[in-house]
Image (cartoon, helix red, strand yellow):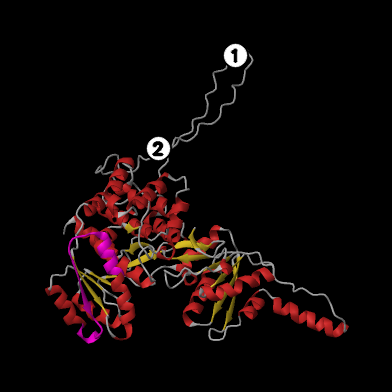
């Protein structure tokens, strides 16, 4: 088995070895010597000397030179099981500094085979970090953390810069433990990427899903012509799922070395027994042996929480219609938000079919209760009383899961109730048609997640076209994604392959509506 095979299997199988690094410190503290005392003479006490600081031996516990193999060092009291438990705890708590530093200690105590597994397993963990997590870790003073973050950022460069960035890391981080196995293999993979020239696209081009299939096809063609790549692209109709296997073999017979699609889950499941790794299915199923890329593959709730935490918010109000998809998102945000110490969230729903938006906001901010108390007081007193509702003042922000037209109804009510708190939303707040030039003045200041195409659509007209564009980018750069790189110029977001699930995930951008009601990137 070649080194490259070992590496590929380690990434594809998603091994979950717990691994670590730690910076060894050696120190000594020597008390100052007192000069000998002469008999019958007064003793002059020595001037106090500050204790010597421990000498830090920096970067010497890694490899002295690439390929230099240190002898395994003994573990501290408690042994391997204690260290393993501490590593697992750091992993569960998201304490990446401790995780990396502890695992370096584990690496030092391991033999060469164990070290290789450690490097790859650390790499798998780090690849799952969001850009926000990486930015936070960049502020950590730990030299060990900095060396890993430098490698991670280099791997997330655009495809044309990947190999040069990795070579740069090789020169600038000569003592990092990943120099022993991981980095040389990454560089080798990037210098020997598979090129896919003949692409077959399997889409439903008739029947119920024809409109979606045609939009994806249009996006793929726009990306193909914009890329100016050589090679061939052919489209095959998969409207009849019972013929999907025959369509697959026909595409292979026609010379396809990469397949994009199919779209429907029942069609994708029929391709699983064929065990072809050179497929990018456009949906998600269980236990697929190939790469999957779905239309909604962004972890929006995670990005929302990172944004809200960055502002230091604690108390959230959440508004959502009772439709299944939107209510699921709202509940997920509430549940995850309240897992963090000191965080609270209030969820208010309203009917999706006949929404009473003003009532929903009134209930969220306790205006309804205030009005009821006023009515009771007026009946008791029998007099007309000057009244303005007393509303809750503990909310730091409100998140609304709904389409932009409904959110535009909510926003003026915030001004009426003198609610000067920020409002956030998911990608649903972006227009569905990218060429829509309508100004939504009432959405001024709304912050929401969006696909880059929502801000700069260029030639694209719909988000399904943007999805088609990115599926073509993913197909032509699949080797880069498999080797840990990312596609930073995607139309639906930054694209990255999750090595544990073999699914391509999107990272959206943050956008806002400006004073004129137009979308602007933040």
Quarter assignment of residue 293: bottom left
**Residue at the image point whose x is 33% and y is 68% from the top:** 501
Q: Is residue 356 above or below residue 136?
A: below
Q: Is residue 300 left or right of residue 387?
A: left
Q: Position of residue 429 (x, y in %)?
A: 50, 70
Q: Position of residue 219 (x, y in %)?
A: 31, 69
Tell me, yes or no, if residue 179 can be seen here. Answer: no
**Range shown magenta:** 219-243
Q: Is residue 486 above or below residue 427?
A: above
Q: Describe the element under mark 1 as helix, strand or loop.
A: loop
- Given residues 328 and 437, the one toward you in this image is 437
Q: Is residue 501 above or below residue 269?
A: above
Q: Of label 1 and label 2, which has the lower sequence position?
A: 1
Q: Is residue 213 left or right of residue 374?
A: left
Q: Is residue 56 left or right of residue 497?
A: right
Q: Describe the element under mark 2 as helix, strand or loop.
A: loop
Residue that protrudes farthest toward the top in the picture: 40
**What residue is pinned by disc 1?**
39
**What residue is pinned by disc 2?**
57
Q: Position of residue 401 (x, y in %)?
A: 52, 74
- Is disc 1 surrounded by few (<14), some (14 to 19) or many (20+) residues within 10 Å? few
Quarter assignment of residue 237: bottom left
**Residue at the image point whose x is 70% and y is 79% from the top:** 368
Tell me, yes or no, if residue 82 can be seen here. Answer: yes
In space, the residues marked 1 and 2 are separated at their CA atoms by: 44 Å
**Residue at the image point whose x is 27% and y is 54% from the top:** 116
Q: Which mark is residue 280?
A: none
């Amino acid at each position: 088995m070649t080194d490259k095979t070992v590496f590929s299997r380690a990434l594809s199988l998603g091994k979950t070895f717990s691994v670590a690094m730690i910076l060894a410190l050696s120190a000594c503290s020597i008390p100052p010597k007192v000069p000998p005392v002469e008999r019958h003479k007064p003793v002059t006490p020595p001037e106090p000397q500050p204790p010597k600081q421990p000498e830090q031996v920096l970067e010497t516990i890694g490899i002295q030179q690439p390929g230099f193999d240190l002898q395994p060092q003994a573990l501290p009291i408690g042994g391997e099981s204690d260290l393993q438990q501490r590593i697992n705890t750091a992993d569960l708590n998201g304490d990446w500094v401790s995780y990396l530093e502890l695992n370096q200690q584990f690496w030092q105590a391991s033999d060469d085979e164990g070290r290789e597994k450690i490097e790859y397993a650390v790499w798998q963990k780090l690849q799952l970090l969001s850009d926000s997590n990486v930015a936070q870790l960049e502020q950590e003073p730990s030299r060990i953390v900095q060396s890993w973050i430098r490698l991670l950022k280099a791997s997330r460069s655009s495809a044309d810069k990947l190999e040069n960035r990795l070579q740069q890391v090789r020169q600038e981080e000569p003592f990092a433990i990943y120099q022993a196995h991981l980095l040389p293999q990454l560089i080798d993979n990037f210098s020997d990427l598979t090129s896919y020239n003949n692409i077959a696209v399997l889409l439903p081009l008739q029947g119920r899903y024809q409109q979606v299939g045609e939009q994806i096809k249009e996006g793929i063609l726009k990306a193909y012509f914009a890329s100016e790549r050589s090679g061939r692209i052919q489209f095959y109709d998969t409207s009849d799922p019972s013929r999907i296997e025959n369509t697959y073999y026909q595409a292979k017979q026609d010379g396809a070395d990469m397949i994009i699609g199919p779209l429907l889950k029942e069609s994708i499941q029929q391709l699983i027994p064929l065990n072809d790794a050179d497929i990018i299915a456009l949906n998600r199923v269980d236990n697929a042996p190939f790469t999957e890329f779905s239309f909604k593959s962004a972890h929006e709730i995670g990005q929302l929480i990172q944004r809200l935490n960055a502002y230091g918010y604690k108390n959230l109000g959440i508004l959502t219609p009772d439709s299944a998809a939107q209510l699921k998102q709202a509940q997920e945000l509430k549940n995850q938000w309240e897992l963090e110490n000191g965080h609270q969230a209030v969820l208010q729903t309203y009917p999706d079919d006949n929404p009473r938006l003003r009532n929903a906001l009134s209930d969220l901010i306790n205006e309804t209760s205030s009005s009821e108390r006023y009515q009771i007081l007026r009946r008791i007193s029998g007099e007309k009383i000057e009244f303005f509702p007393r509303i809750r003042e503990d909310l730091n922000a409100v998140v609304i899961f709904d389409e932009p037209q409904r959110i535009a109804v909510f926003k003026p009510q915030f001004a009426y109730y003198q609610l000067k708190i920020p409002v956030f939303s998911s990608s649903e707040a972006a227009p569905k048609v990218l060429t829509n030039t309508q100004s939504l003045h009432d959405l001024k200041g709304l912050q929401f997640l969006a696909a880059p195409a929502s801000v700069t659509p260029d030639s694209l007209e719909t988000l399904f076209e943007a999805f088609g564009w990115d599926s073509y980018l993913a197909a032509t750069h699949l080797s880069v994604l498999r080797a840990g790189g990312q596609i930073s110029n995607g139309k639906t977001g930054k694209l990255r392959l999750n090595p544990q699930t073999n699914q391509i995930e999107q990272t959206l951008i943050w956008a806002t509506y400006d004073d004129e009601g137009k979308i602007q990137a933040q």
